[in-house]
Amino acid sequence: MAVLDALRPRPPTGPPGGSLLERNLPSLFSVKRVELIVFSRQLATFIRAGIPILDGIRVIREQTGSRLFRRTLDAIASDLRAGEPISTALAHQPRVFPELYVDMVLAAEATGELDIILEQLALYLDRGERTARRIRQAMLYPSLVLGLAVIVVFILITFVLPAFVALFADFDAELPVPTRVLMALGWFGERYGLLSGAAVLLLLVLAYLARNAGPIRRLRHRLVLRTPVFGPLVRLGIAARFARTLGILVRAGVPIGQAFEIVINGTGNHVYRERLRPARERLLVGEGIAGPLAESGLFSSMLIQMVRVGEETGTLDRYLEEAADFMDEDLEYRTRQMVTIIEPMMIVGVAMMVGFVALSVVTPLYGILGHIR
């Protein structure tokens, strides 16, 4: 990766801007993907129309409603006025522009196809945003049901069950097993709830802070690929992103070696990066793309065959785009199927939880009526 590492601009080493909360909790104060899509599309239009990049940035800055994004655009404009290229200005804002985005802009600067790359980036981001939106919409109803069930269970355990326990004590009756189990949970929550919650919160904070440490990141990347349900979806998503990004770069005239460096970094997974580096080395000595990709064992035979045909016909970019379209459609279908399965499972789980609590409340009631008779 020496070539791209040497060309890639480095982010500034000074302190980041923004408030104290923004500096310490950047994930809570991030630019929305929709704003990045609009930025890419508008800037591509300005460049295509011959408008200077700095003037285009000013126009976009006036139109955006996000204070954080306005501050980001101000910093980009300042770098441009200082004579920095657009790739360097974007690299100085790593919280907004991911590494893949900056690398593709850097490559486009060298080929003079910046408007094409920005338009393709907008399409790429828009496709990901639509998929994420569909998943959020599909999970909205079961999430609301789950939240409501948790509230109902909390009210029953906190206010209703203690009253039944007092009545059973008056009648000197034995509590049913479901009620005793639920009361034990309530007792544990009352005695150790704060301590347990603090311990869980501490573990979550530590896991969040350590998530990008080298060994933990590598382990996390390996585990996510081996997960039974989500692993195949992650692999399919990486393959689609790999094919689409490589196709965009090849179409823009980026040298294949540099394009391969960019797509390797863009996989976002340590396992893929390690196993694709030997493929790039073989590519540089003239072995082509299809053979090394096949031996990496990371991609489907369909993608390998499409790459092989594209190499033989000299239309690699077109075949990569077709493969990416197919895999994106497959990923969307599988995601919908997964959500379709998860939704009834969540509803059944909530129904069982509420049913158990209801049984714990109703059973003592019948017991009390029996003692009265």
Image: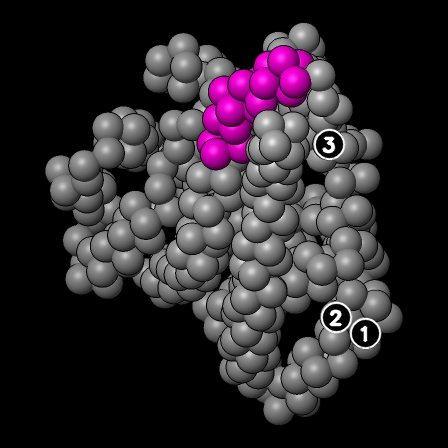
Type of amino acid under label 3: Pro
Task: Identify the main secondary structure in magenta.
Answer: helix
For the record, the magenta segment spans 151-171
* Picture residue at 76% right of the left edge, 81% below the top: 301
* Picture residue at 34% right of the left edge, 62% below the top: 119
Q: Position of residue 134 (x, y in %)?
A: 42, 60
Q: Which residue is mark 1?
A: 294
Within-10-Å neighbours for mark 1: few <14, some 14–19, many 20+: some
Q: Position of residue 8 (x, y in %)?
A: 55, 40
Type of amino acid under label 2: Phe
Secondary structure found at label 3: loop
Real-space Cα separation, disc 3 to disc 1, in angstroms? 62 Å
Real-space Cα separation, disc 1 to disc 2, in angstroms? 7 Å
Can residue 281 be seen here?
A: no
Q: Position of residue 247 (x, y in %)?
A: 54, 71
Q: Which residue is mark 2?
A: 299
Q: Reading the chain from its start, which is encountered first: label 3 or label 2?
A: 3
Q: Reading the chain from its start, which is encountered first: label 1 or label 2?
A: 1
Report if the CB atoms under discs 1 and 2 are less than 8 Å apart. yes
Secondary structure found at label 1: helix
Q: Which residue is mark 3?
A: 176
